[in-house]
Amino acid sequence: MVVHKEIDLLNSFGISPFTYLVVPRMVGVIVSLFTLTLYFNLAAVLGGAVFANIFYDIDIGLFIHRLFRELTFIDLFVPVIKAVLFALSLA
C-alpha cells in the first residue's frame, strides 16, 4: 500500500491509516480466536464426557455435574486471557 501511495491517499482524506487498517484486523482476530477457544474447550469437555461414558461407564450428567463442581473461576479465566493475548500478538 505504501508503493501505490494508498497510505498517503488515506492521510489526504483525513482518515487515520491505523484506525482504518489495523484496528479492524485486531478486533477480528481477537473475536475469532476468543470464539474458537470457547468452541474447542467445549468440544474437549464433551469429548471427555463421551469417552468417560463409553470406556468407564460414567454417566454424562454425573460427569458434567462433577466438572462444574470442580471448576474454579481461574480455570475458565486463564484460557480466555491467553487467547486474547495470543490474538494481540498475532494481529
Image (cartoon, helix red, strand yellow):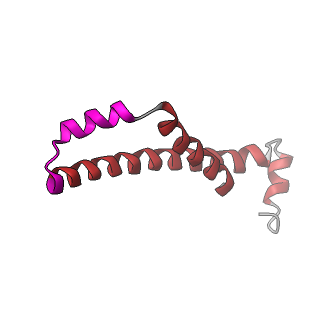
Q: Is residue 2 above or below residue 67?
A: below
Rendering quarter of residue 62 = top left
User: Whole-percent x and y of residue 56?
Assistant: 17, 53
Q: Is 68 in front, or is 34?
A: 68
Q: Which image quarter holds the N terminus?
A: bottom right
Viewer-proximal residue, 69 or 88?
69
- At x 71% / y 51%, what residue is drawn? 21
| Image coords of residue 67 (percent x, y) | 32, 37
Give the image location of residue 47, x and y in percent: 27, 53
| Quadrant (top left/top right/bottom left/bottom right) for the C terminus | bottom right
Q: Nearer the viewer, residue 81 or 91?
A: 81
Instruction: Residue at 55%, 41% (x, y): give it.
Output: 78
Prevalent SS, magenta region: helix
User: As drawn, is 40 to the left or to the right of 34?
Assistant: left
- The tally of labels here is 0
Give the magenta part as a residue range: 54-70
Q: Residue at x 82, y 69 (%)?
A: 3
Going by the image, does 45 lie left or right of 27?
Answer: left
Along the horizontal axis of the image, is 81 left or right of 19?
left
Q: Is residue 42 magenta?
A: no
Going 19% across and 36% down the picture, which residue do you hit? Answer: 61
